[in-house]
C-alpha cells in the first residue's frame, strides 16, 4: 500500500515521504512569497531544518529563520517572533517542527497584524471574533514529530510567563492553508520523543472518543487514530527508520487533532497546568495522567469502550482497555507518577484552580470539580 495522498480535510494536506521538496509550491498555493520559517531552538541547526531552508532558497524564497521558541512557548517568544516577521517584511509563515514550533509559528502569523494583546483572543466564548481576520497572514505547516497534530488545528497553546498558565488561543483562520506531512522528517526523532509525542496523539483520540458531545465524524476518526497508535507506535519506537510506522503515526497525530474538535477532557485539564508550572513534556504528562482519568470517567465511558476494544484488538472490553493502557505506558518507559518528572505535590492547591479554569474541562464526560481534580492530582503526582 502506497502511503501517499493529497487530502482536503481538515485542510489541504500533501502527505508522503519526500514531499518536503514541494515546500515552494505549498507557499505559492498559500500566496506566500517572503516566508519566515518559525521553529524551536533545538531544531534550528538540524539537517531537516537546513534542508528546508535550502529548498526555499533555491526557489528564490530566501532562508529567513526565527527559532527563539521555548519548549512551552510564551508571549515573550511570540513578541520576538512578530518583531522578526515585521522587521523582515514577510508575507506568511512556515510553521515547522513539533508542537512548540507549530503553535508559535501559527501565532506569529495570527498576531503580526493585530493591535490587541494575544490574551484577548483566548478560547473563551466568542473572543476570537475580536481579531481582525483580514490581517491574519497565511500559514504553511510542516510537522517534524507525530503527536500534537497542531498542523491541522485552529488554535495554539501559549504559556503566560507571568502566571505560568497555559492558554489556548483560537481563531478559525489559524488553520494552516497547506500542510506538508513528510514522514522522513520524523526519522531522526529520539525514542523518548517518539514515545511522548505518539502518546499525545493517543490521548487526543482517547479524550475525543470519551467526550459526551455529538460529532460522529470525530468519533470515527478518534477510533481509527487509536488503532493506528496501538499498531504502529511500538514499531516506530523500536526502529526509528521504519518509514511505514512513521507515516502511520504522522496520520494518527493529524487524526487526533482533527478528532478533538469534539472535545478534550481531564487528561489535558491536568497536564496543561503541570506543563506550565514544571515545564514537563506535554505528551508524556498526558500518558501519566491517562489511567487515573479513565478510572474517574469509567461510569460514563465504559459502554463505548466495550464496543471499541474489539476493534482495537483488545480483549476484555473497557477493563481490558484500561489494563492495556498501563502496559502500553510501561512499553515505552513512561513514569508511573509525575513526581518522577519533577512535579511537586506541595503545589496541588495551586494547580487545582488552574485545571478547573482550563477549557478542556468542558469536554470531560464526568463533571470536573475542585474535589475530583484534587484527587486526580494526588493520584498522578
Image (cartoon, helix red, strand yellow):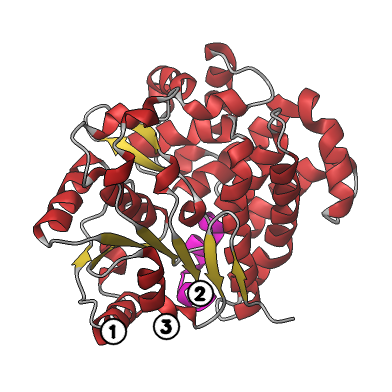
Q: Sequence-wise, which precedes: disc 2 or disc 1?
A: 1
Q: Sequence-wise, which precedes: disc 3 or disc 1?
A: 3
Mark count: 3
In the displayed structure image, the side of residue 83 where residue 357 appears, left or right: right
Residue nearest the observer in this picture, 356 or 137: 137
Residue nearest the observer in this picture, 321 or 77: 77
Q: Label 2 to label 1, Cα distance in Å?
A: 19 Å
Give the residue at the far bottom of this rendering: 58
**Residue at label 2?**
182
Q: Label 3 to label 2, Cα distance in Å?
A: 10 Å
Q: Main secondary structure of the magenta part?
A: helix
**Residue at label 3?**
21
**Residue at label 1?**
59
Placement of 219 over or under 12, stated as above or below: above
The reply to whether dot 3 and dot 1 touch (C-beta < 8 Å) is: no
* Residue 24 in view in this figure: yes
Instruction: Provide residue 289's location: percent of width, then percent of height.
Output: 58, 37
Part of the protein shown in magenta: 183-199
Instruction: Provide residue 103's location: percent of width, then percent of height.
Output: 37, 50
Instruction: Provide residue 341's location: percent of width, then percent of height.
Output: 44, 44
- Where the N terminus falls, by quadrant? bottom right
Amino acid at each position: 500500500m502506497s502511503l501517499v495522498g493529497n487530502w482536503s480535510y481538515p485542510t489541504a494536506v500533501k502527505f508522503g515521504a519526500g514531499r518536503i521538496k514541494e515546500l515552494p509550491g505549498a507557499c505559492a498555493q498559500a500566496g506566500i512569497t517572503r516566508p519566515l520559517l518559525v521553529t524551536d531552538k533545538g531544531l534550528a541547526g538540524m539537517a531537516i531544518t537546513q534542508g528546508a531552508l535550502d529548498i526555499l532558497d533555491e526557489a528564490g524564497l530566501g532562508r529567513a529563520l526565527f527559532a527563539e521558541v521555548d519548549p512551552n512557548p510564551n508571549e515573550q517568544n511570540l513578541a520576538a517572533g512578530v518583531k522578526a516577521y515585521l522587521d523582515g517584511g514577510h508575507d506568511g509563515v512556515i510553521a515547522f517542527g513539533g508542537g512548540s514550533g507549530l503553535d508559535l509559528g501559527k501565532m506569529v502569523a495570527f498576531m503580526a497584524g493585530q493591535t490587541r494583546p494575544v490574551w484577548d483572543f483566548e478560547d473563551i466564548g466568542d473572543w476570537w471574533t475580536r481579531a481582525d481576520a483580514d490581517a491574519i497572514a497565511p500559514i504553511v505547516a510542516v510537522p517534524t514529530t507525530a503527536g500534537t497534530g497542531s498542523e491541522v488545528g485552529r488554535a495554539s497553546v501559549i504559556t503566560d510567563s507571568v502566571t505560568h498558565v497555559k492558554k489556548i488561543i483560537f481563531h478559525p483562520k489559524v488553520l494552516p492553508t497547506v500542510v506538508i506531512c513528510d514522514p522522513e522528517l520524523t526519522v531522526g526523532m529520539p525514542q523518548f520523543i517518539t514515545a511522548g509525542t505518539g502518546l499525545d496523539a493517543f490521548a487526543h483520540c482517547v479524550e475525543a472518543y470519551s467526550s459526551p458531545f455529538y460529532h460522529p465524524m470525530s468519533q470515527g476518526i478518534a477510533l481509527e487514530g487509536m488503532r493506528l497508535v496501538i499498531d504502529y507506535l511500538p514499531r516506530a519506537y523500536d526502529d526509528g527508520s521504519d518509514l511505514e510506522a512513521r507515516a502511520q503515526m504522522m496520520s494518527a497525530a493529524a487524526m487526533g487533532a482533527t478528532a478533538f474538535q469534539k472535545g478534550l477532557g481531564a487528561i489535558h485539564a491536568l497536564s496543561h497546568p503541570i506543563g506550565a508550572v514544571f515545564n514537563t513534556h506535554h505528551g508524556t504528562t498526558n500518558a501519566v495522567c491517562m489511567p487515573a482519568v479513565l478510572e474517574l470517567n469509567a461510569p460514563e465511558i465504559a459502554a463505548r469502550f466495550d464496543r471499541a476494544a474489539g476493534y482495537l484488538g483488545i480483549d476484555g472490553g473497557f477493563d481490558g482497555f484500561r489494563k492495556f493502557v498501563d502496559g502500553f505506558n510501561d512499553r515505552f518507559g513512561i513514569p508511573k507518577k509525575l513526581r518522577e518528572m519533577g512535579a511537586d505535590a506541595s503545589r496541588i492547591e495551586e494547580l487545582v484552580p488552574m485545571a478547573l479554569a482550563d477549557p478542556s474541562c468542558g469536554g470531560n464526560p464526568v463533571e470536573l470539580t475542585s474535589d475530583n481534580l484534587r484527587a486526580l492530582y494526588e493520584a498522578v503526582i
